[in-house]
Image (cartoon, rainbow, N blue to C red):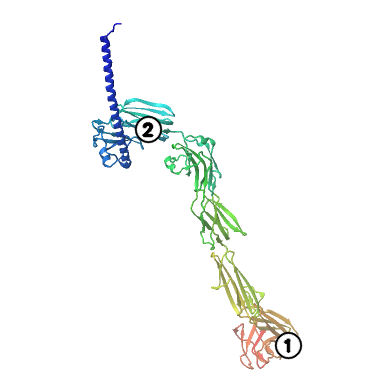
């Protein structure tokens, strides 16, 4: 078989194949060399980046402050401070220490990224390893309000575009497709739920950076206060002095509240006003109570302050959502007043007027009010005489009243004042006087009546002064004496005792008594006129200088014969009871013994003052009554007068040697 040669097409094909193989071989060698060079510089960049990270660990104050901000440290600084040895290029020549550096960028609040840049033997590190940084402000939040999130993108080059997706409760809630980035983006989260945001930034080199935010929780639904049962140990709207203990029981449904931190707060209102503005939550948060377990349970709270109080419990979750529940209104009054009782007149001082008692309390008023029980001690027992809301009471009845006031608050707290003694006396003192008379040995043997005469040796006057209320001042004739006092009087004559008594209330009484004593006997005398032979009349005269004559005997007549002789005796008594005896002797004859007695003889009455007297004879007498006064002895004629008128009369014969007077009655 004859050999055939290659055709032109076949030769061309072989040439093309050989050329391709040669090209591939050269390119493969070049790629190997380039790969080896990249690996070398990658290793040098990693060493440089590690040196920069170590440097910033020692100099944290030089780290960038804001997320997305960039800082750098030169290779020269790292070499000079021995953080790295000399760095050489692939051809073993030293790298440019001034234009080689490590760049640091703040990615999050705690994270930083480090990138090394080398310039050696014509090699320059690409900047593709610094992507844009996405920052969310705030990065996470829990709130009961709409949450506004700001998304910022930072890069060492210019940021070109952005996009984001918002997830709510694990599902896409909203999103923004790729859009030109001009400024920070505002994202609003409004509905209840749990949110996360994934944001993406792209720079003008096409490098992209992505970040997922933290969790945003929005909860606008508060706790259910109907799950709280409130029980009190006191009756509502009734005053008490005790603390009010409130017990809060949380029903089991409360344990299902999601996201709640089991916080609650108790507060109460003073003098509650339904229209009063409520205290803001910000003012309340500083005083909340926190349960230590995972669910709300029974708890207690005590109201201690005085006033009308209404308890209020506020439940709130960690987001600040709240609910309120009010208790009933309770009245607390712990007032223990100081009490003083005063009067219009000082205590224990007598007066004629009504006494007004006034209560003073400290404090003047109390939330529950005062009730005043005015009490008087009657038969040893304190008895309420007046119950009042007012602080005054007037005592009007006469007498001694031991008074006090019992003050009671509306909460039944009682305080008792000191005793106040009221003395009302409108009755004058009583002066009782007893008068007794008797001998000097005993002046109390018989009763004596004031202003009557007595012949007793002495009289005792005893005074006793009494008053139904207070003290008494007693005087006798102006001199102060005891309220019981005895005065003895024994002198002759008349004495008057004036008693005056004044009690503490200025009531006055007076008494006057008179004592009259007469120890001397009365005196008596006789005058007589004779008429006829058988009948004679005579008169007795009596006198007393002090008490006067009580009985003198008066006039009397007697019949007698010529031979008869009789004696009449008269008893004279004065007003004091003193007695004296007077006698008159009647006889007939010419001669009789004449002593201190008076004689009547015949038809004539002779009053003799000498030892003897004789019959007086008258003849030729004219007129109704004649009186003959003899001035001498044995006269033959005397001067006669008719009823004290001088005129002639008959001769008066004298049969006796001595006589004075002769009376004749025709």
The local secondary structure at tag 2 comes to strand
* Residues packed near mark 2 inside 10 Å, few (<14), some (14 to 19) or many (20 plus): some
Choose between 649 and 182: the one closer to the eye: 182
Crowding at dot 1, Cα within 10 Å, few <14 / some 14-19 / many 20+, comes out as many
Which of the 4 image quadrants contains residue 423?
bottom right
* Mark in the foreground, 2 or 1: 2
Q: CA distance from mark 2 to mark 1?
A: 172 Å
Q: How many marks?
A: 2
Please say if 102 is above or below 517: above
300 sits to left or right of 488: left
Q: Quadrant of the C terminus?
A: bottom right
Q: Residue extending furthest top?
A: 1
Instruction: Name the disc covering residue 588, or none.
Output: 1
Expressed as whole percent of the image width and height from the top left, the position of residue 29 reads 28, 24
Determine the secondary structure under disc 1.
Answer: loop
Give the x, y percent position of residue 585. Answer: 71, 86
Question: Closer to the camera, 383 or 443?
Answer: 383
What residue do we see at 48% from left, 34% from top? 258
User: Which quadrant: the N terminus?
Assistant: top left
Nearer to the camera, 513 or 17: 17
Q: Are marks 2 and 1 in contact (CB under 8 Å)?
A: no
Q: Which residue is mark 2?
A: 148
Q: Residue furthest front?
A: 1
- Residue 280 can be seen in this image: no
**Front-most of residues 574 and 272:** 272
Q: Earlier in the sequence, mark 2 or mark 1?
A: 2
Q: Position of residue 371 (x, y in %)?
A: 54, 51
For residue 265, side relative to residue 42 (left or right): right
Query: With 129 as the anchor, is 405 left or right in this view?
Result: right
Q: Would residue 33 be visible to someone looking at this image?
A: yes
- In the displayed structure, does residue 77 sit left or right of residue 279? left
Looking at the picture, how far across and down is residue 589, in whole percent? Answer: 73, 89
């Amino acid at each position: 078989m004859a050999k055939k040669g290659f055709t032109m097409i076949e030769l061309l094909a072989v040439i093309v194949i050989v050329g391709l193989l040669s090209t591939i071989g050269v390119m493969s060698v070049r790629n190997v060399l380039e790969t080896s060079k990249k690996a070398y510089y990658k290793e040098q960049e990693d060493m440089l980046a590690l040196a920069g990270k170590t440097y910033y660990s020692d100099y944290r104050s030089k780290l960038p402050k804001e997320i997305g901000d960039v800082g750098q440290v030169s290779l020269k600084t790292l070499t000079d401070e021995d953080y790295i040895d000399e760095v050489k290029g692939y051809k073993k020549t030293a790298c440019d220490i001034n234009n080689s550096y490590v760049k640091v960028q703040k990615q999050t609040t705690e994270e930083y990224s480090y990138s090394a840049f080398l310039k050696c033997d014509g090699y320059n590190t690409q900047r593709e390893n610094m992507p844009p940084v996405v920052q969310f402000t705030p990065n996470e939040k829990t709130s009961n309000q709409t949450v506004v999130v700001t998304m910022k993108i930072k890069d060492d080059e210019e940021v070109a575009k952005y996009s984001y997706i918002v997830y709510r409760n694990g599902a896409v809630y909203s999103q923004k497709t790729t859009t030109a980035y001009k400024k920070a983006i505002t994202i609003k989260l409004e509905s209840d739920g749990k949110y996360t945001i994934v944001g993406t930034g792209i720079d003008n080199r096409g490098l992209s950076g992505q970040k997922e935010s933290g969790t945003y929780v929005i909860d606008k639904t508060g706790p259910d206060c109907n799950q709280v049962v409130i029980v009190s140990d006191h009756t509502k709207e009734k005053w008490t002095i005790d603390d009010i203990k409130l017990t809060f029981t949380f029903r089991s449904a409360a344990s299902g509240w999601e996201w709640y931190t089991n916080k609650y707060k108790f507060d109460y209102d003073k003098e509650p006003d339904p229209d009063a503005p409520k205290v803001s939550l910000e003012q309340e948060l500083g005083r909340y109570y926190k349960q230590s377990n995972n669910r709300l349970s029974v708890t207690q709270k005590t109201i201690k302050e005085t006033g009308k109080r209404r308890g209020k419990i506020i439940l709130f979750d960690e987001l600040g959502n709240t609910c309120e529940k009010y208790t009933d209104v309770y009245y607390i009054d712990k007032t223990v007043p100081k009490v003083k009782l005063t009067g219009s007149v000082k205590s224990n001082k007598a007066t004629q007027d009504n006494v007004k008692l006034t209560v003073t309390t400290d404090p003047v008023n109390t939330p529950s009010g005062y009730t005043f029980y005015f009490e008087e001690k009657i038969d040893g027992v304190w008895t309420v005489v007046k119950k009042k809301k007012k602080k005054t009471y007037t005592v009007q009845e006469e007498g001694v009243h031991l008074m006090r006031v019992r003050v009671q608050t509306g909460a039944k707290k009682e305080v008792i004042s000191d005793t106040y003694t009221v003395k009302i006396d409108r009755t004058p003192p009583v002066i009782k006087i007893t008068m007794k008379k008797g001998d000097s040995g005993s002046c109390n043997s018989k009763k004596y009546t004031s202003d009557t005469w007595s012949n007793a040796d002495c009289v005792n006057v005893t005074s006793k002064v009494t008053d139904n209320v207070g003290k008494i001042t007693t005087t006798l004739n102006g001199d102060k004496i005891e309220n019981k006092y005895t005065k003895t009087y024994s002198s002759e004559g008349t004495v008057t005792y004036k008693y005056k008594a004044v009690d503490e209330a200025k009531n006055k009484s007076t008494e006057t008594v008179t004592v009259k004593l007469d120890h001397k006997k009365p005196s008596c005398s006789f005058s007589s006129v004779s008429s006829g032979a058988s009948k004679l009349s005579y008169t007795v005269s009596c006198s007393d200088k002090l008490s006067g004559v009580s009985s003198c005997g008066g006039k009397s007549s007697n019949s007698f014969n010529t031979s008869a002789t009789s004696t009449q005796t008269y008893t004279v008594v004065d007003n004091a009871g003193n007695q004296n005896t007077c006698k008159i002797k009647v006889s007939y004859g010419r001669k009789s013994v004449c002593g201190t007695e008076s004689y009547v003889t015949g038809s004539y009455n002779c009053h003799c003052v000498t030892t003897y007297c004789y019959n007086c004879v008258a003849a030729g007498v004219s007129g109704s009554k004649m009186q003959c006064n003899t001035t001498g002895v044995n006269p033959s004629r005397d001067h006669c007068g008719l009823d004290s008128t001088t005129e002639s009369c008959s001769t008066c014969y004298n049969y006796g040697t001595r006589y004075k007077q002769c009376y004749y009655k025709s």
